[in-house]
Image (cartoon, coloured by chain):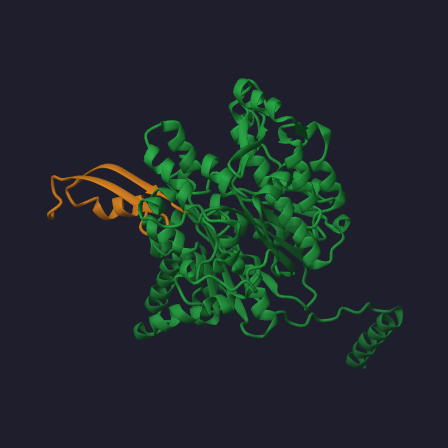
Amino acid sequence: MSKVGIKGYSYCLNHAPETGSRYGGTPYEAIHSGKEQEYLDSLPKFLQSYEHALHYAPNQTYIGGISYEEFESLKTPWVENLLSDEKAKRYGKFGELMPEDEFLGLISACDEFELVWLEKAFAEGSAKKLAEDPVITEAIVKRVLRPKNMHEISEIETEVKERNGLALYFDGKVIGCIRSGHPTDPCLTAHVLLENLAGKASGVLALLHLLKNTGMNPSDLDFVIECSEEGAGDVGQRAGGNFAKAIAEVAGCINASGCDVRGFCAGPVNAMINAAAQVASGARKNIAVVAGGSIPKLYMNSRDHVKKGLLALEDCVGSFAVLIVPDDGTMPVMRLDVLGKHTVGAGGAPQAVTSALTFEPLQSAGLTFTDVDRYAPELQNHEITEPAGAGNVPLANIKMIAALAVMKKAIEKPAMMQFIKEHGTIGYAHTQGHIPAGVPFIGPACELIKEGKIKRAMIIGKGSLFLARLTNLADGASFLIEAPEPVAETSAVSKEDVKALILEALSEVAGKLA
Amino acid sequence: MGKLAGKKLLLLGERDGVPGPAMEACLKDSGAEIIFSATECFV
């Protein structure tokens, strides 16, 4: 079996401006350097409200509030052409955009070690709101209300002042804290634990939506592969893991186990390949590929946004989940025989990378560039990246693919712009590292395939391995999603069939001997 | 040897554009001294 079915998918956002504007990597660095007071004073004026985030088209596209096709037709800039109230809903076809007070409650529900303290009234309010969420279970709501996680504000303030706790804010007030996990271990500081618990909580939300979207009973899930960029561990093994199993536990997937796959932004595509191979081989009955999001990536480019007087839009922790099952001929499939691999020897030149991820796998399958209806390479929202000087990443990638298609004589040079328009994708994902890495388009691609509008899409992820200072290399991987084909029925052979076949063979032999 | 001969170069690459090592390879025979080369990621 070289194909697996994509049974469902979920995409969620957790609005987190107050947490992000203090503990996102860029603001956090500025606070601690003490050298960027002007930026820090200005940032709060450029934060986006939850209501505004709901009306912002890229966010609704991510959670499936509007279709990808509708998104493509919208007037830009999206930030000045907000969606109508009718379309700006919390819940979309794929998932939801959760407000920050509920996200903090969910983080508390994901805490097993009394690391999260929320002020009692805040915790109760958050739990009450969470109880209205269709995917949040009663057990999760009860966990928010555990006495060990609820404390007086005076106790919280003491924990922050005297024991290296990290204050949590809502409406500008301290409403809780993350406690330090160890007096000296740098891998268990409150700041690291906030990142990991937020990654876990956002992953839980995505998995819960996946279970709802697919109608799967949590106890039927066999395995989880988590593919974010966080590292959970202690001083002895600083990224030992395992987010996958921790997420499955909170989601009630009692028969599942799991493990983590890492590779910077190439992690999700590699995790999809890993999951598909395990399901195709029969090693697992089904696998949920899940990723929570990143607190450090919040407001990563906000220095430039603030400098240019623009809204700082990097305020959502993203997450996603995809359910891989055996191919039964009824759902979009992921092919395992056409995989893009950026080898060590391929080099880092853009042409070499693009060739390894698109041309080479397509050629090996007897396909050409125009056989792929849509390419989804890195789907960052350009309204976030362009003001920061990082350009329009998805457009840059599809331009490179188009140029390679011309070089390989798959299209004529004058047809390049048409190819870019017809086969490219517009980015709508938050700059959450692994989150925009091709995978946001798995959902829309499957929807377009089910509607008969496209037959084939390529998902491409690229990872900046060099950031870890282990190698100067980047990485990349890709795979194809296609429309299903009827699966040939394999009926059991009866004893009578075997007898008839033997008799037929014997009579043939007898005939030749005669 | 071109107009970069004898110059000192700082190369700032980008993952989805042109990475640092690719620029280094192109400029290897330019006669310039590459004193810093890095690739950054803003996404």
Q: Is residue A284 visible?
A: yes
Counting labels gives 0
x, y (%) of residue A339?
51, 57
Q: Which picture quadrant has residue A464? A: top left
Quadrant including the C terminus of chain A: bottom right
In the image: residue A320, left or right of residue A461 = right
Relative side of A119 to A408, left or right: right
* Residue drawn at x 39%, y 71% as measured from the top left: A419
| Colour given to chain A in the rendered image | green
At a point 50% along the width and 69% down the height, the residue shown is A70
Q: In the displayed structure, would residue A494 be above or below residue A293?
A: below
Q: Colour of chain B?
A: orange
In the rendered image, residue A31, in percent from the top left (x then y), is placed at 40, 30
Q: Picture quarter containing residue A469?
A: top left
As drawn, A239 above or below A367: above
Q: Is residue A338 visible?
A: no
Q: Indicate left or right for A301 with A1 as reference.
A: left
Residue A446 in the image: state x and y as whole percent.
59, 65
